């Protein structure tokens, strides 16, 4: 029996493509990068024009989708938070395995989302839709932004684009991965997240990585599960979603919900995996046959700190992912790749991931100075 085809569309489609393959699907991928390992997982995939800040170019995306997979199933990741109307166009004639464009728009609209939290009694930091008169202590966030690159101290934020403002609060940044079928929810796991500040400009909250497991108190866990359940019943969320929050002691404050598979898929997924559960939950079947992988795991993004060019002879370490194609030119501040690490504790996994980020960047810089180098020698440690 041949594997069921599915179209994966995301800013970076590799993690979703890998999860689809582990679950027995045959993914076709459209993303912005066309990385080596993405093309290996989904031969014939397409990298279309666009940017991390603005997402896909509409015409390029729709034309690629019509050529690659004019019908069949569609799963989306990051890239549509500010453009639900583009998701609606992409979904025409296809079976959407994910939240509807209408649900996406509601969840990512601060004028709708935070009043919903208030009505459900779910705690969150203070929010303003206009720039506070005294901006110190507030963060400015772009409506529909993702990845943390859009978050600025309010006093440093410019006046362009749709923004909202959120009071800065103390605590640990924790993400909750959950599965939903439109009526019920299942909390799958927690991860602690951290930023990778961009030293070239005011981007102190750029996403750096995540490690699992993360611990919260029993009371917070009960209240979190209740909050997620209430959100699902009210909004009809389906499939894999994530909730970002700040945890301080036994209290938490909800920052946002990402109504799609997110950045922690790599550290939570294992065969037969979460992708099949996502598809089933989108069809109203909340399966229980899944356990988080043993031990601890972390993933982190390596961002270029100088202009880089990826040579044709580079051999990437087995713990790297999202490997750029030969000849790729990477500007300072842009992502180079993802690194993965496992260990006995989340703290150790995060530390190992950080070492690997540094090793990749050092090796690529060294390779640029020695063009005949055939491998990232300093990345050879396990």
Image (cartoon, rainbow, N blue to C red):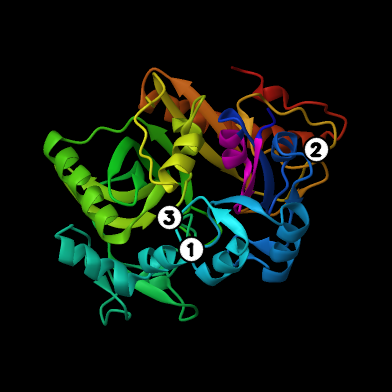
What range is drawn magenta here? 4-20
Which badge, 2 or 1, comes first in the chain's sequence?
1
x then y, percent, for residue 335: 62, 48
Query: Within 10 angstroms of label 1, few (less than 14), some, or many (20 or more) residues?
Result: many
x then y, percent, for residue 32: 68, 54
* Residue, far left: 219
User: Which residue is found at the position 74% from the left and 34% from the top?
Assistant: 40
In this rendering, is residue 145 above or below 377?
below
Residue 355 in magenta stretch = no
Along the horizontal axis of the image, is 206 left or right of 109?
A: right
Residue on which the image places disc 2 = 369
The reply to whether discs 2 and 1 touch (Cβ–Cβ < 8 Å) is no
Q: Is residue 299 visible?
A: no
User: Which residue is found at the position 58% from the left and 36% from the top?
Assistant: 20
Residue 205's label in the rendered image is 3
Along the horizontal axis of the image, is 163 left or right of 168?
A: right
* Residue, far front: 1
Distance from the alpha carbon under mark 3 to that under mark 2: 31 Å
For the N terminus, the quadrant is top right
Residue on which the image places disc 1 = 81
The reply to whether discs 3 and 2 touch (Cβ–Cβ < 8 Å) is no
Along the horizontal axis of the image, is 134 left or right of 159?
A: left
In this rendering, is residue 55 above or below 303?
below
């Amino acid at each position: 029996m041949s594997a069921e085809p599915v179209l994966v569309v995301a800013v970076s489609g590799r993690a979703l493509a890998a999860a689809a393959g582990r679950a027995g699907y045959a993914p076709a991928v459209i993303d912005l990068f066309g990385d080596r390992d993405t093309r290996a997982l989904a031969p014939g995939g397409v990298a279309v024009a666009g940017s991390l800040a603005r997402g896909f170019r509409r015409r390029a995306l729709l034309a690629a989708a019509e050529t690659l997979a004019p019908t069949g199933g569609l799963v989306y990741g990051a890239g549509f938070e500010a453009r639900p109307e583009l998701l609606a166009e992409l979904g025409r004639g296809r079976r959407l395995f994910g939240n509807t464009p209408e649900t996406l728009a509601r969840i990512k609209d601060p004028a709708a989302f935070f009043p919903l939290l208030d009505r459900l009694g779910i705690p969150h930091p203070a929010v303003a839709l206009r720039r506070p008169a005294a901006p110190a202590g507030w963060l400015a966030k772009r409506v529909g932004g993702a990845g943390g690159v859009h978050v600025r101290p309010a006093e440093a934020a410019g006046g362009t684009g749709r923004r909202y403002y959120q009071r800065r609060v103390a605590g640990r940044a924790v993400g909750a991965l959950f599965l939903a079928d439109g009526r019920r929810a299942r909390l799958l796991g927690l991860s602690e997240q951290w930023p990778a500040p961009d030293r070239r400009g005011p981007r102190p909250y750029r996403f750096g990585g995540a490690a699992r497991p993360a611990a919260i108190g029993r009371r917070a866990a009960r209240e979190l599960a209740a909050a997620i359940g209430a959100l699902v019943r009210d909004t009809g969320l389906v499939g894999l979603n994530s909730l970002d929050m700040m945890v301080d002691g036994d209290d938490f404050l909800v920052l946002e919900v990402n109504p799609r598979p997110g950045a922690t898929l790599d550290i939570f997924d294992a065969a037969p995996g979460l992708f099949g559960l996502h598809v089933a939950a989108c069809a109203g079947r909340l399966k229980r046959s899944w356990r988080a992988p043993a031990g601890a795991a972390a993933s982190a993004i390596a961002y270029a700190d100088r202009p880089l060019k990826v040579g044709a002879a580079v051999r990437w370490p087995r713990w790297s992912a999202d490997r750029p194609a030969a000849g790729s030119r990477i500007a300072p501040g842009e992502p180079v790749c993802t690194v993965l690490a496992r260990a006995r504790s989340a703290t150790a996994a995060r530390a190992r991931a950080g070492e690997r980020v540094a090793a990749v960047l050092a090796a690529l810089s060294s390779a640029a100075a020695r063009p005949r180098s055939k491998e990232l020698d300093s990345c050879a440690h396990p």
